[in-house]
Image (cartoon, rainbow, N blue to C red):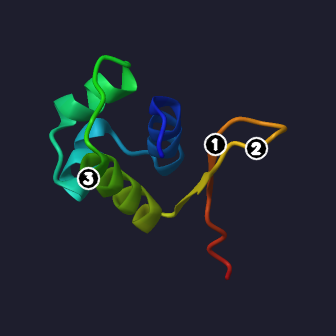
Amino acid sequence: MLTPSQVRAARSLLKWTRDDLAARSGVFANTIKNFENGTSDPKRSTLLKWRRALEKGGVIFIDADAEAGPGVRLRDERK
C-alpha cells in the first residue's frame, strides 16, 4: 500500500515535516518516524490516513510495475 520511502519522498515533495503530516493525518509524529525508519508496521487504517493527507496535499502515489518500484510525484496544479 505505502512504503516508508514513499512517505519520506511525499513529505519531501510537499516540504512537510513529520509534525506537518502528523497534524494533517491525526497520527503521532513518532509513529511516522518509526514507519519511515522501518521499525514499525502500522495498521492499514494508519496508512490510509497518511495516504489521504498526502494526496490532499498534492501527491500522487505510483504503484510498482514490471519496470520500476513504487514512487510518488506531484499532481499537476495547472489542471
Given this view, does label 2 or label 1 mark the residue nearer the observer? Answer: 2
Nearer-N-terminus badge (2/1): 2
At label 3, counting other C-alpha atoms closer than 10 Å, the crowd grade (few under 14, some 14-19, many 20 or more) is: few
Residue in the image at 38% along x and 45% along y: 16
Task: Indicate which disc residue 65 carries.
Answer: 2
* Residue topped by disc 3: 45
Tag 2, which secondary structure? loop
* Residue topped by disc 1: 71
The three-letter amino acid code for the residue at tag 1 is: Gly
Nearer-N-terminus badge (1/3): 3
Residue in the image at 47% along x and 51% along y: 14
Q: Position of residue 31 (x, y in %)?
A: 21, 32
At label 1, counting other C-alpha atoms closer than 10 Å, the crowd grade (few under 14, some 14-19, many 20 or more) is: some
Residue in the image at 30% along x and 17% along y: 39
Residue in the image at 66% along x and 70% along y: 76
- Position above or below: 8 against 15: above
The three-letter amino acid code for the residue at tag 3 is: Ser
Relative side of 3 to 61, left or right: left
Tag 3, which secondary structure? helix
Front residue (pair 6, 48): 48
The three-letter amino acid code for the residue at tag 2 is: Asp
At label 2, counting other C-alpha atoms closer than 10 Å, the crowd grade (few under 14, some 14-19, many 20 or more) is: few
- Position above or below: 11 against 48: above
Quadrant (top left/top right/bottom left/bottom right) for the C terminus: bottom right
Relative side of 27 to 54, left or right: left
